[in-house]
Image: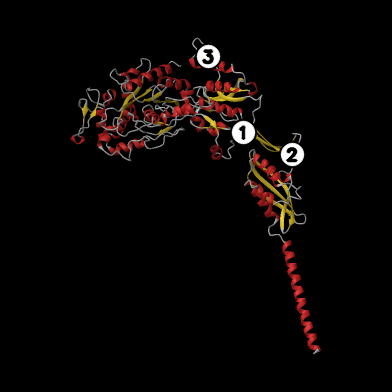
């Protein structure tokens, strides 16, 4: 019995002992588990740095030991880090760990980041504490930059790049730095504030609420100068002229009335200026302050909220070259404002000047001649390919975009039925009879036209056969013999309709394709593509016949037309146009052997007759001192074949024929709505006056 009791006691003891051991083991396991971190310090640091690029400051705060880190509050932590990292525009942050001291729980690492002033790379250290199985950062300001103390500030300084100028071939300014007048108010000097604001609104053509909003801005103090509007600076020299223009006098009067209002000041301010204004607005374009969309689209390109960006024309086309790169530095300064450490610095690079082949005087003269018309003109040196002028009328003053355009004026421009904002020289137009020399060259090249073959006098109307129904090709003059030269002189539609039928659809399509139709014009400015049909081919015989005299579905860009005409001056080679000025530039051929040398010479001689023969449609441009060649054209724009109310486009292509003359030139002009105004003769008269100025050296 005793033995049994002893055995039972022994068994209970063993069980108790086993339970005790198990309990100790479980406790030991949990103690051990609590002491083993689930994430390494290296991973913690990389995660922390990744939060910086994502602007996740609250998550960063959760990864630090706030107590050991100087009891910093989350609010102060977020404020300090966001101000610095966002102030320097941190992006693309990378961390490379170089060593880890396990005993000291200290990591040495290298950081690389992109900033507003460029890339920054530096070495640093980070210390950790193990707390409840997790590594937490011991934070202080030196974790941002090694040299940064809690009382220091990080300062970003920017030096704005000077925007490059746009100049013409002779160095005349097309876009650059100018001076305007900034009209503003010193609030503390205003008397009868409400009355003064009403007067200002009327004189400045502003809304009273817009003026009040500017005066209520947070930065405004009683002695602040609050700019309200930028206006043209009154040119004293213009005022002193014998007959000062009315605009200058009106602006002078307005500014004098403004200065009578107590508190109003007029100060000089530097602005982007476009001296040619309306005469070159479609060519030069304009700049505007960047928008949020611009900043997003051009992220990383050095733009800030104070930047301007080219919005159209040359300003937009050469934006990268013109804008330059701002200089920028990131500096640590102490509590007294003393420079402590330059983190990174980039030197300002001013924008490059862009010199164009444009001749300002020619540009202005073409604009003056056609400013009241819906028109476009291009002028080139047909031997070199230099583009001398690109004009679209009516136009707008690109300076208005710099001085500040009212919504009323903007709406008026966009709602104007004459479309002053529409760039006509970039478009395609029905060329009418100016296309006949091209058809002549195609016919001679393909062998479809014998220049001496007499097509016979058909009178003033003709149709191929009765299958054309009531449709007839009409012309204005009867003459004999009906050969190529006379057909060009008299601008005979019937001859060229027959010539097109002789050429045939296939040869016509392939020839025009070779001349660049349906292709991109190799030029700085994107031009609409010329076409020979609204579909991929010429569908009908009537369409083919109409194409022969520049009607049907033929549409041509004016600069492309000039390039095709250049082949007559360059032994059959079509010149490549260019806009950026080059010293001693060699001509570049766009399409080699567009026509043969003999064909080009034949058409050249015949187009001379158009200008110099008294019966020629371009005889009004005839000169006794210089031999010109060219072709007139009147294109009918109808809703249908039976339309008798359609409008007309007037064309004139005219060019010098002596390669060795000092200033060779080719002008191609198109004017809308010339019906009842002389047709193409209206354009001939205008271009003749332009040429008179050009040849006189003005």
How was this image coloured?
A: secondary structure
Q: Closest to the observer: 168 or 637?
A: 637
In the depicted structure, whether residue 349 falls above or below residue 92: above
Q: CA distance from mark 2 to mark 3?
A: 55 Å
**Tag 1 secondary structure:** loop
Q: Is residue 448 visible?
A: no
Residue, x 58% and y 40% (percent of image)? 300
Quick check: marks 2 and 3 in contact, CB under 8 Å? no
Residue 178 image point, x, y percent: 56, 23
The picture quadrant where one finds residue 478 is top left
Residue, x 59% and y 32% (percent of image)? 306
Q: Closest to the observer: 357 or 204?
A: 204
The picture quadrant where one finds residue 258 is top right
Report the residue that reaches farthest toward the right. Answer: 2
Residue 627 image point, x, y percent: 36, 19
Residue on which the image places disc 1: 326
Q: CA distance from mark 1 to mark 2?
A: 25 Å
Sequence-wise, the earlier of marks 3 and 1 is 3
**Tag 3 secondary structure:** helix
Residue 643 image point, x, y percent: 27, 30
Side of 542 where 183 appears, left or right? right
Residue on which the image places disc 3: 238
The picture quadrant where one finds residue 431 is top left
Q: CA distance from mark 3 to mark 1?
A: 37 Å
Instruction: Please state the total of marks drawn on the protein image.
Output: 3
**Tag 2 secondary structure:** loop
Residue on which the image places disc 2: 152
């Amino acid at each position: 019995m005793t033995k049994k009791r002893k055995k039972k006691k022994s068994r209970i003891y063993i069980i108790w002992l086993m339970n005790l051991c198990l309990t100790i083991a479980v406790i030991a396991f949990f103690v051990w588990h609590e002491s083993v971190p689930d994430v390494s310090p290296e991973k913690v640091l990389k995660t922390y740095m990744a939060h910086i690029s994502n602007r996740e400051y609250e998550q960063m705060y959760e990864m630090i030991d706030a107590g050991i880190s100087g009891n910093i509050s989350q609010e102060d932590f977020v404020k300090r880090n966001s101000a610095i990292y966002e102030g320097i525009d941190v992006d693309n942050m990378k961390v490379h760990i170089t060593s880890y001291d396990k005993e000291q729980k200290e990591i040495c690492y290298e950081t690389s980041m992109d900033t507003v002033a460029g890339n920054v790379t530096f070495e640093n250290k980070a210390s950790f504490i193990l707390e409840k199985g997790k590594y937490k950062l011991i934070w202080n300001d030196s974790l941002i930059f090694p040299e940064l103390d809690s009382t220091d500030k990080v300062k970003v300084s920017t030096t704005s790049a000077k925007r490059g100028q746009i100049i013409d071939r002779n160095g005349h300014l097309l876009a650059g730095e100018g001076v305007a007048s900034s009209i503003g108010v010193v609030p503390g000097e205003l008397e009868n504030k409400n009355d003064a604001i009403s007067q200002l609104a009327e004189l400045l053509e502003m809304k009273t609420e817009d003026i009040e909003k500017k005066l209520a801005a947070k930065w405004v103090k009683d002695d602040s100068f609050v700019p309200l509007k930028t206006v043209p600076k009154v040119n004293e020299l213009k005022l002193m002229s014998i007959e000062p223009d009315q605009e200058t006098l009106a602006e002078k009067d307005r500014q004098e009335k403004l200065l009578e209002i107590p508190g109003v000041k007029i100060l000089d301010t530097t602005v982007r200026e476009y001296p040619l204004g309306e005469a070159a607005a479609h060519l030069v374009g304009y700049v505007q302050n960047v928008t949020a969309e611009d900043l997003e689209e051009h992220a990383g390109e050095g733009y800030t909220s104070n930047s301007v960006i080219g919005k159209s024309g040359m300003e937009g086309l050469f934006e990268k070259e013109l804008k330059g790169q701002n200089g920028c530095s990131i500096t640590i300064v102490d509590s007294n404002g003393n420079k402590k450490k330059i983190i990174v610095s980039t030197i300002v690079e001013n924008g490059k000047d862009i010199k164009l082949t444009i001749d300002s005087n020619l540009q202005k003269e073409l604009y003056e001649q056609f400013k009241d018309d819906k028109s476009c003109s291009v002028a080139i040196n047909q031997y070199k390919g230099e583009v001398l002028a690109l004009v679209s009328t009516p136009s707008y003053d690109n300076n208005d975009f710099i001085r500040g355009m009212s919504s009323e004026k903007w709406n008026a421009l966009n709602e104007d039925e004459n479309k002053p904002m529409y760039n006509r020289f970039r478009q395609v137009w029905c060329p009418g009879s100016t296309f006949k020399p091209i058809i002549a060259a195609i016919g001679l090249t393909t062998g479809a036209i014998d220049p001496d073959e007499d097509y016979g006098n058909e009178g003033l109307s003709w149709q191929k056969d009765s299958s054309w129904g009531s449709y007839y090709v009409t012309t204005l003059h009867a003459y004999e013999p009906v050969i190529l030269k006379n057909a060009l002189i008299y601008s005979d539609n019937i001859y060229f309709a027959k010539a097109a039928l002789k050429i045939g659809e296939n040869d016509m399509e392939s020839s025009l394709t070779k001349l660049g139709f349906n292709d991109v014009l190799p030029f700085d400015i994107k031009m609409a593509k010329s076409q020979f049909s609204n579909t991929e081919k010429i569908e009908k015989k009537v369409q083919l016949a109409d194409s022969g005299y520049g009607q049907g579905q033929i549409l041509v860009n004016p600069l492309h037309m000039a390039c095709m005409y250049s082949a007559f001056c360059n032994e059959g080679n079509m010149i490549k146009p260019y806009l950026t000025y080059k010293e001693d530039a060699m001509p570049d051929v766009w399409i080699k052997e567009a026509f043969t040398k003999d064909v080009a010479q034949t058409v050249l001689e015949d187009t001379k007759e158009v200008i110099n023969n008294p019966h020629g449609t371009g005889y009004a441009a005839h000169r006794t001192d210089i031999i010109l060649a060219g072709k007139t054209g009147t294109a009918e724009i109808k809703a249908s074949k039976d339309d008798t109310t359609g409008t007309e486009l007037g064309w004139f292509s005219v060019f010098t024929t002596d390669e060795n003359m000092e200033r060779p030139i080719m002008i191609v002009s198109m004017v809308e709505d010339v019906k009842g105004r002389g047709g193409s003769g209206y354009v001939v008269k205008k271009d003749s006056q332009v040429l008179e100025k050009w040849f006189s050296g003005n």
